[in-house]
Image: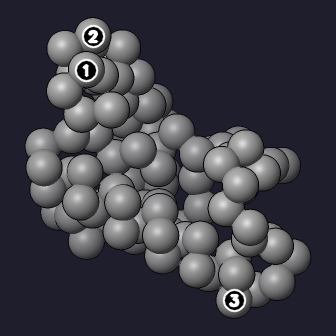
Amino acid sequence: MVQEAELGFNLEISHEKARLNELLAEISENEYQAGRPILSCLVKVEGSKGQGDNFYKLCERLGLGEWRTLKQDPEFLKTMRRDCRAFWLDPANYEQFA
């Protein structure tokens, strides 16, 4: 995502990685508050099976549950991803919000 979107972050540098996490959280919070799915659920971290703690802590801040519980629930992330893809595959949503 960083290279494709030409964001210019070097993820080897901790403060740049932290800034990317902040940007993703800000976008996700705005999308969620507008009634749209959390886009960062689709972000895949190279070498990991799912999302990191920051994603689940964001979900907790949004009122979706306690982050450790959400992280332990394998269906939570699957459902988030499925709902996000379904929302954006709907031509009406894509046309209105993309």
Residue 97 on image: x %, y %: 24, 33
Q: Where is residue 50 in the image (x, y as percent from the top left)?
A: 62, 45
Name which quarter of the figure residue 33 lies in: bottom left
> Disc 1 residue type?
Glu
Kindly indicate whether the residue at mark 1 contacts the one at mark 2 (C-beta within 8 angstroms): yes
Work out how far the residue at label 2 is from the one at label 1, CA to CA, in angstroms: 6 Å
The residue depicted at 36 percent of the width and 14 percent of the height is 89
Give the CA distance from mark 3 to mark 1: 35 Å
| Disc 2 + disc 3, Cβ < 8 Å | no
Q: How many marks?
A: 3
Percent of width and height locating residue 82: 40, 23
Residue 95, label in figure? 1
Disc with the residue nearer the chain's start (2 vs 3) = 3
What residue type is disc 3 on?
A: His
Asked if residue 60 is positioned above or below residue 95 in the image, the reply reads: below
Q: What residue sits right under mark 3 in the picture?
A: 15
Of the residues shown, which amino acid type is indicated by label 2?
A: Pro
Furthest toward the bottom, the residue is 15
Residue 26 at x, y percent in the picture: 36, 68
Sort mark 2 into few (<14), some (14-19) or many (20+) by Cα contacts within 10 Å: few
Q: Say which residue label 2 marks.
A: 91
Q: Is mark 1 on a helix, strand or loop?
A: helix
Residues 10 and 78: in front is 10
How crowded is the residue under tag 1: few (<14 C-alpha within 10 Å), some, or many (20+)?
Answer: few
Q: Which residue is drawn at the image coordinates 84% and 49% (left, top)? A: 47
Image height check: is 12 above or below 15?
above
